[in-house]
Amino acid sequence: MLRSLVELKPRDVPLGVALRNAAGLVLPLGVGIASGHVAIGLGVATGALNTMFLDQPGPYRLRMQRMLLGALGSGLSAFAGSLLGAHAIAMAAAALVCGVSGGMLVALGPNAGRAGLTCIILLLVTSADPQPIRGAAATGLLIFAGGLIETLLALAAWPLQRYRPERSALARVYRELATITQRPISPNRLERAPPVTQGLLEVEHLLNGEHRARGTEMERFRVLARIVERVRLELLALADAISTLPDDEARHTLLRLREYASRTLAGIGVALEHGTTAEATSGAIEGYDAALAAFETLAHAADPRMQRTLTVALARAQALAGQLRAAIRNAGLAGARGELEAEEQEARLPAALRPMSALATLRANLHLQSVAFRHALRLGVCVCAAVVGERMLGYPHGFWVPMTTAIVLKPDFAGTFNFGLLRVAGTLAGLVLTSALLHYALDNVWAQLVLLALLGIGFRMLTTINYGLGVMMLTGLIVILLAFHGIAPGESMPLRAIATTIGSALALAAYALWPTWERLRPSLATMIESYRVYFSTLFDGDAGLRRDARVASRTARTNAQASLDRLRGEPKRDPALIALAESVFANANRFVRACMALEAVLQDSRERPAHDDVLAFARRVDAALGAVADGLRHDHPAQVEGLRACERELARKLAAVPPDGEAHAVAIAVADACDRITDSVDTLAHLLDRDAGHAAAAQLG
């Protein structure tokens, strides 16, 4: 837990985004200072500061909707805070309502949760300066104007680079896959999640999500997305084959194939990023073809004992060559203006991505077992109590107490604890540093404005790297804004430090009194069930259902991993459950990799040797996975019997396929994948049996 406080995560906010956000913050204030209307400039800058959180990646249409709604909510909250600030009872009631409603928005996702938190903060901040209805309306309009400016800056490139988000997301996936392919084949790769899972999820949302862009150009992006899916399948299957080969010429030839494939993928990524053709990949694909020809010769003259492995590897290498050429053909035209020949019908919204309406989602979370609802009640009561307390005590600048409480409180313990400590540490560091700079070095208003811009850039870029560093930048921002408002840094520093400490302590105390502990087992069960659905789609020939299942399984795995990470941060975590979860992840990854190898085989050939026996085996696997998921969800052993015997019978049928023709190669690959599937499913069942045995022994002991 302490290590997580100093952990530095990868930066996910590009410099260009930070620059435009800082411009939206600084420019209105600079105009206000130059024209003598500092108060107006401060109001607009405050609105910009609170809306820049919502400038997140995604289609321009979604970005516009998200930021406009956030700006509107901020303006309404500022209006309510300014209007009710002079009335303690009304303000406490507003804090309760806003806290509960804003807290419930976490059920709609992180961006909605940020918007809800922004509304709570502005309600509290503007309550410190009560206004009559006309003044309150003016305050709300200024806040909305600041959010509108940030929105316009975020959308400025839309007419010129309409498909830039989609092209960049695809380019990242191709480049990431190229980087992974360059690495040595890991001996424990089967226990790891398949590569570029998160990147493919982002691409799926961009291309097929509710707010996807329209136009014929999107067809080419969808083609490229399907191609990179196939390339990933073939690379995984090829790596599995290489790992079983001795250190001989055939293995080295396959490693050369991987190197050429990596160069090709990297070139395609560059072409997508810059909107150019993929001509630079011509040398790499020619090298791939030469290495493939050499491997074909080696495979045909191989020792009979290695024939099975080399046959599988050759089929995968040939399929990979076709997919790489298809990617090269399509990359140059991706996003180009003009008419494109449609590769498929207009992509429908996948069932896995088709959400309920926002109101339906919120209604579904209105019960005490819901993490979002418990968080909303906890947040609303705490913010209301903090408002009542600071009003009764008459604490100067008392809004900092409930504001800190709202910022620190998260739905999970680890998030609340980490945010609380980092909030206090970052606030104190930011207060001391910025106050010293303003007091001793920067007494010129324009120098202070430059410092404000630098802190704005730092805040946007550092917050996701480490929250404490982000808070330090944010604290400096607020100190400068207060200085423009006439509050000296020396005056605000001790008051803000004390208020931040009190607000963080209140949030931690509230969570200790009514905690929400992580429930990991349902998340693991949902992941296994999603893998079960994906496996079942391999045999029905419906590409749409298979794509939906693939997306749903990635989402379920991401959610389960996040649940495990949250559990690790809890003080009463169960070491046995964490160990079980880690083993489940490892073997579930082995299962899904074997399924992906099977998918690659079935997509490449119309041959279906021993088809009835394969379907019988698939039904056994489906029942076994259902038992594993139920055992995980309800904490009992999984009853899995006869799966290995069924697989051995299938292997005998597949081995009897005549050695001449394509059916033989397919039979070898199917037998290998089914053997791996059986091994991973049996191991999952064994883990649950062992876990139940340990639990029974602990109870007896």
Image (tube, helix red, strand yellow):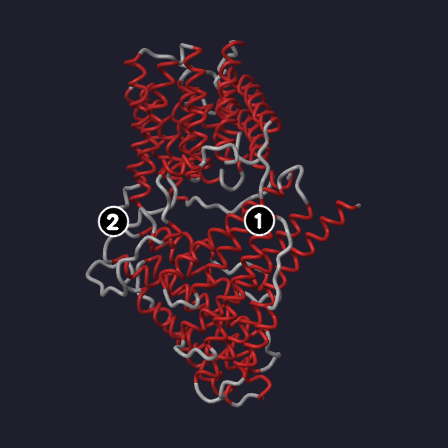
* x and y, in percent, of residue 636 in the image: 64, 51
Q: Residue furthest left?
A: 339
Q: Which three-letter amino acid code belongs to the residue tagged 1?
A: Arg
637 to the left or right of 32: right
Q: Which mark is residue 539?
A: none
Q: Residue furthest right?
A: 701
Question: Where, quadrant-wise, is the C terminus in this rendering?
Answer: top right
Residue at 50%, 15% in the rendered image: 398
Eyeballing the image, is 149 above or below 245? above
For label 2, the residue is 160
Point out residue 546 in the picture as x, y percentages from the top left corner. 40, 62
At mark 2, the secondary structure is: loop
Q: Is residue 639 above or below residue 645?
A: above
Instruction: Look at the numbered discs 1 and 2 and tell me whether their residues touch, using CB distance below 8 Å.
Output: no
Q: Secondary structure at mark 1?
A: helix
Lower position in the chain sequence, tag 1 or tag 2: 2
Q: Residue at x 45, y 25 (%)?
A: 99
Which residue is nearer to you in this view: 600 or 484?
600
Q: Is residue 539 above or below residue 17?
A: below
Specify the quadrant of the image occupied by residue 168: bottom left
State the residue position of label 1.
633
How far across and down, in percent of the image, does residue 658 sit? 49, 88
**Mark 1, mark 2: which one is toward the viewer?**
1
Asked whether 540 or 132 is in front, the reply is 540
Q: Quadrant of residue 175?
A: bottom left
Instruction: Please name whichever residue, 376 or 490, is drawn nearer the observer in this view of the structure.
Output: 376
Please tell me which residue lies in front, 68 or 656: 656
The quadrant of the picture occupied by the N terminus is top right
Gap between marks 1 and 2, in whole Å? 50 Å
Residue kind at label 2, given as amino acid type: Leu
